[in-house]
Image: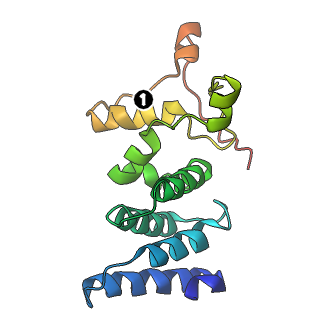
Amino acid sequence: ALLQLNSRAATKRANTLYDEMKQKWWISPDTVLVDTILTAMISGGPVGLEDDDVKFILTVLRDGARLEWEEGQYEKRKRAVRAILMACSSDMWKRDEFAFNLMREKQPEDPLFTKKGWNTIDSGFRLWGSGDGDMDQLQQRLDGDDRPSVDSFLASKGWNDIDSGFRLL
């Protein structure tokens, strides 16, 4: 009910209550609670989600992994969270191992594509960023390589990597 207020204070209070429920009262969330929180948190889309919101969503999704769902229901929630994270302006998911692995998971084949005999195409274009280059840079950092990554196209032209600061949104 708190999350329906759709305010920063309500989200913070819901997060606190959720943590308190698990840690102080030893109450484990069930599928209804996980589903309610995820629906409320991601129904507004990625606009306005801050690091704390992303952490809360990931915590709830992680807790949901331990629950028994009907077939395909947990995967549906993972896809919804993944879509929000891809469009989210927060880079917090890149620093969270669970979220990073969630984003790296291979997407299951779309039934419509299978039915029509189509294949998927990854144009590499991301309206809000979060392309594979970001993943490569994170993997480099995790491997201990602090050198900046240069896009292969830029490198092939002998150009350097420039961050203009221009963003579509």
Residue 15 to residue 95: above or below: below
Instruction: Point out the image quarter for the N terminus.
Output: bottom right
> Does residue 87 appear left or right of residue 55 in this picture?
right
Q: Quadrant of residue 139?
A: top left
User: Residue 3's x, y, as percent?
Assistant: 58, 82
> Does residue 132 appear left or right of residue 19 in this picture?
right
Q: Residue furthest right?
A: 168
Coloration of the structure image: rainbow
Residue position for label 1: 148
User: Residue 40's x, y, as percent?
Assistant: 60, 74
Looking at the image, which residue is at 50% across and 59% down? 73
Q: Quadrant of residue 105?
A: top left
Looking at the image, which residue is at 34% across and 31% down? 140
Q: Quadrant of residue 43?
A: bottom right
Residue 124 to residue 18: above or below: above
Residue 69 to residue 101: above or below: below
- The type of residue carrying mark 1 is Pro
**Residue 31 in sight:** yes
**Residue 96 in sight:** no
> Does residue 98 appear left or right of residue 81 in this picture?
left
> Does residue 67 appear left or right of residue 32 in this picture?
left
Instruction: Please tell me how crowded label 1 is: few (under 14), some (14-19), or many (20+) other residues with Cα within 10 Å.
Output: few
Labels in figure, total: 1
Label 1: which secondary element: loop
User: Residue 64's x, y, as percent?
Assistant: 39, 66
Depth order, front residue of 118/61: 118
Looking at the image, which residue is at 36% across and 65% down? 68
Depth order, front residue of 19/134: 19
Looking at the image, which residue is at 48% across and 77% down? 32
User: Residue 37's x, y, as percent?
Assistant: 52, 75
